[in-house]
Every structure is written in C-alpha cells, then in structure tokens.
Image (spheres, helix red, strand yellow):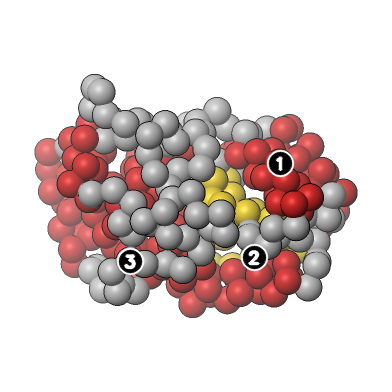
C-alpha cells in the first residue's frame, strides 16, 4: 500500500533535492551534500520499495525505515511530505525555532519517522531490535536502515551486524550511502573501510554493491534483497556507491558541503543546476 501522487522515483529524487536545498537555505543549516548523496536511494525506497500508508503512519503491516545518518534528515522530511505524511508547506519550517522538523531527524510528532537519529551508530542496532521483534511475532514486514559510510567507524554497527547474522534476520536490509567522505575528510584518510563488501560477507551478510544514483540498478538491488528475505536468507547489505553533493557540480566530492549552508549566489547556482537536470 502506497497512497501518494503518481510520481516516478526520478521525479521524486529531483523534488527531494529541490526542497532540501531550500530547507537548508531557509534554516541556515548544514548537510546538503549528505542529503544529495542519499536522495536517489530515498526516492527509490519511497516510490517503489517501502510498503506504507501515509494516512495511517502506524499501519501495523508497514515496512520500517530508519535513517541512521540522521544529520541528513532534510531528505527524509522532504520524501515524507511529498508522499503525503504531512503538508509540503511545513518543510519551510525546517530547523526553525519551535519546528518539529529538527536538524537531525526526529520522530517526535513527525508522522512517518520511526526513530530519532543523529548519534551515529544507533540506527542499525535499533533496526536489528525491530527485526528481532518482528521475527518473534511472525510479522512479515521488512526493516530498512540507511547508514553513512563514515558511520561504519562505529563499533556498535559491527556488533549489530554480528547479531543480525546470528539471529538470521532475513528481513533486515541495510543500505550504506557510500560517498567515500565523512565530516572533514575522505573515509580512506580517516579510517579505511575497504575491502568493505568482504567485511560484511565475513560477518554473514548477503552483499549487493550497486550504483547509488542509477534508479534501475537500485530497484534491482532492492528486488534481490526482498527475494533473499522471502527465501529466508541472511540479512542483506546494499553498498550503494554515491557522490557527495550529487546533482550540483561545485558540491560534488567537495568536503566543504558537509557543513556549508547554500546561501546567496551559491544557492542560486545550485538551484539553476538542479532545474537544468530536472527529469
């Protein structure tokens, strides 16, 4: 069940980026580069993969989604509004005093958000707990969680990965926004992750690596993850190769746009580039 306006994942990705650009400008907030790297993943999830009912956010049969990289919450807020969970107009209040749309994603009063995140390394452990609870109860929904690659420095993620495989959490799908950057530098210079896929294989995961900006490739990856889950396979990790700041040339692979806010001519130039690439 996915009652929402008829829209393709490509159109949804454009709108997520467009709204997030405006949200971060209005609130003078950060992390637009992180939102742009995850936008295509979110768009495919909300347009084609997740089972939900925006009129009933607590629908028991819904799939659960946790954005572990909670600093990129503007992208999830945009996706939820565009899918009908709350009015799109409310996105203009993002990061403002008194707004329920906080800088790091929050479930407090926000329909469609399962869990507040921001402290990195928490999303996967919580997702594991949700998947264990569903398995005990015999529920058949999937639990998805989107991690940042820098977040994989956290030991809590690897402890959770061990638990996921040990508990045979076949309906757990971990997605990693692998943009190769974290906070102030490249991941390789901070704490190398490669061989990334082999690490997850060693932990007992079904590993899929794909282009995180190619919508057909992402849809195929999620189809394979669901098939694996339906067959009772091991937990799945989708390592999605992405580009930080994807969609705006001067933001792409530029570490400044982890914390920089798009203002003035930079905002205008970014808006022009997004509009030129509109599907």
Q: Is residue 102 above or below residue 152?
A: above
Marker count (numbered)? 3
Which residue corresponds to mark 1? Answer: 129
Secondary structure category for the residue under label 1: helix
Q: Which mark is residue 209?
A: 2
Q: Earlier in the sequence, mark 3 or mark 2?
A: 3
Residue 239, horizontal then vertical, whole percent: 62, 58
Compared with residue 73, is residue 218 higher up or lower down, i.e. above or below?
below
Q: CA distance from mark 1 to mark 3?
A: 29 Å
Q: Secondary structure at mark 2?
A: strand
Q: Position of residue 173 (x, y in %)?
A: 65, 57
Q: CA distance from mark 2 to mark 1?
A: 25 Å
According to the image, label 3 marks what residue?
A: 4
Q: Residue at x 22, y 31 (%)?
A: 27
Which of labels 2 and 1 is toward the front?
A: 1
Q: Residue 155: image x %, image y %? A: 73, 32
Q: Within 10 angstroms of label 2, few (less than 14), some, or many (20 or more) residues?
A: some
- The x and y percentages for residue 272 are 15, 58
């Amino acid at each position: 069940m996915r009652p929402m306006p008829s829209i393709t994942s490509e159109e949804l990705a454009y709108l997520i980026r467009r709204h997030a650009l405006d949200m971060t400008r209005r609130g003078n907030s950060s992390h637009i580069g992180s939102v742009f790297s995850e936008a295509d993943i979110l768009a495919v999830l909300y347009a084609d993969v997740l089972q939900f009912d925006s009129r009933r956010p607590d629908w028991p049969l819904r799939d659960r989604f946790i954005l572990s990289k909670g600093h990129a919450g503007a992208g999830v807020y945009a996706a939820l509004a565009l899918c009908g969970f709350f009015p799109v107009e409310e996105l203009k209040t993002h990061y403002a005093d008194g707004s329920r749309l906080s800088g790091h994603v929050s479930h407090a009063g926000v329909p469609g958000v399962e869990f507040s995140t921001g402290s990195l390394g928490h999303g996967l452990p919580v997702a594991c707990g949700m998947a264990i609870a569903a398995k005990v109860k015999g529920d058949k929904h999937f639990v998805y969680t989107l991690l940042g690659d820098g977040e994989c420095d956290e030991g809590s993620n690897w402890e959770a990965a061990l638990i996921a495989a040990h508990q045979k959490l076949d309906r757990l799908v971990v997605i990693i926004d692998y943009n190769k950057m974290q906070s102030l530098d490249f991941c390789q210079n901070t704490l190398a992750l490669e061989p990334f896929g082999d690490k997850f294989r060693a932990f007992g995961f079904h590993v899929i690596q794909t282009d995180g900006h190619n919508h057909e490739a992402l849809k195929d990856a999620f189809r394979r993850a669901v098939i694996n889950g339906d067959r009772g396979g091991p937990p799945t990790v989708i390592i999605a190769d992405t580009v930080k700041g994807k969609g705006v040339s001067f933001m792409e692979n530029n570490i400044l746009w982890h914390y920089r806010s798009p203002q003035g001519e930079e905002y205008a130039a970014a808006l022009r580039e997004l509009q030129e690439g509109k599907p």
